[in-house]
Image (tube, grey):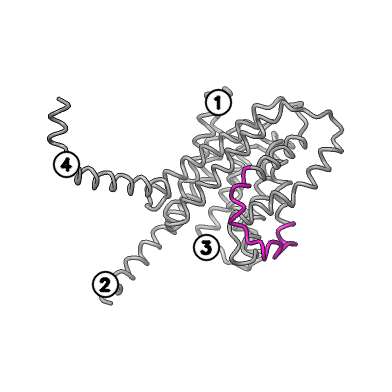
Amino acid sequence: MDRLLAQTANPLADSVILRCFRADLVDVVTGRTVNSAIALLILGNALAIGSDVAVKLLDRDFPLFQFVFARSLCTILFLAPLYSQIEYPRLFRGLGLHTLRAHISLAGIICMVVSLQWLPLATANALFYTAPILVMILATVFFRERLTPLSVLAVASGFVGILVILRPVEINWAGATALTSALALALNALLVRKLPEGQSNIHVLTLNAWLGLPAVAVLALLEGTPWDWSIWPYAVGSSALILGYNLTVLLAYRFVDASQVTSAEYTGLIWAVAIGWIWFAEVPDLWFVAGSLLIVVPLLLLAWRNSARTRQKTALISPSDQDS
């Protein structure tokens, strides 16, 4: 049999097949096609939920600020191999804005950790998904952007969804911290527009981590608890997984239009429900399902509408390109 295979083998054909396989693999890994970008976002959101799980596995009496400090330090160390992408001649350009974003991010991370400790995994993530709604509201206030009827529907439906999930009689500080974390995400998303042009994502992420470190170090010292090395494996895991999420997002949006794939971001809620149910025995109730649908469905409709508009523009442009 081996001799028969050797006789029928075609080195040239094998070489071509191998090159094609490698090209397809590169397309999948780097998100050069719509399907591969969607796959990257699904994977990335699973990694993000994994980061949340690492936080949720901590004992509730853990030193909060020590953990956030350890997580921030791990982020800095993980980014170190990529420091070559930093623009050192213009390292501190836009320093004031970078500092503001770093401390907003720090507040958001602290609130995120608290909410994950005290809320079911799926409930916390459903509230995190209000960030795009808050972005739309804040954009109308600070940038005078106009909301379309569908955007208004998404905002109104999102807030109703929040009330349905939390229910006014059950609103507590844990729900408030989750919404504060979403607000921090929304503010930072808007402030990205004001960042200096030409700074890479690694540049922005690195400054964000370094500039927030002194504040959280002071908070960890003021916390007044003995140093706890047992939290470090969770900090390492959470930091590594969330950086993995950021990497998949960068790859997914680098080569394809965001409107074509952004709906895949909401698979994170599916991951949260599944992992919360299987790992933590957190069975979602009908209130959660109804509220989540009110938050996510209008956002999906917005994403699909933007995708349809993009396809229409492409269809209109293509004939002229062919004529030229």
**x%, y% of residue 40?**
45, 44
Q: Which mark is residue 10?
A: 4
Q: Secondary structure at mark 3?
A: loop
Q: CA distance from mark 3 to mark 1?
A: 36 Å
Q: Which residue is mark 3?
A: 148
Secondary element type, mark 2: helix
The residue type indicated by label 2 comes to Gln
Q: Magenta part mainly helix, strand or loop?
A: helix
Mark 1 → mark 4, Cα distance in angstroms: 56 Å
Kindly identify which numbered label has been placed on residue 283: 1
Q: Is residue 84 magenta?
A: yes
- The residue type indicated by label 1 comes to Val
Magenta residues, as a range? 78-99
Amino acid identity at mark 4: Asn
Residue 83 location (% of width, % of height): 62, 52
Task: Quickly name the residue at label 2.
Answer: 322
Crowding around mark 1 (Cα neighbors within 10 Å: few <14, some 14 to 19, many 20+) is some
Q: Nearer the viewer, residue 156 or 14?
A: 14
Q: Residue at x 84, y 30 (%)?
A: 225
Question: Does residue 77 appear to the left or right of 318 in the view shown?
Answer: right
Q: Are marks 1 and 4 in contact (CB under 8 Å)?
A: no
262 falls in the magenta region: no
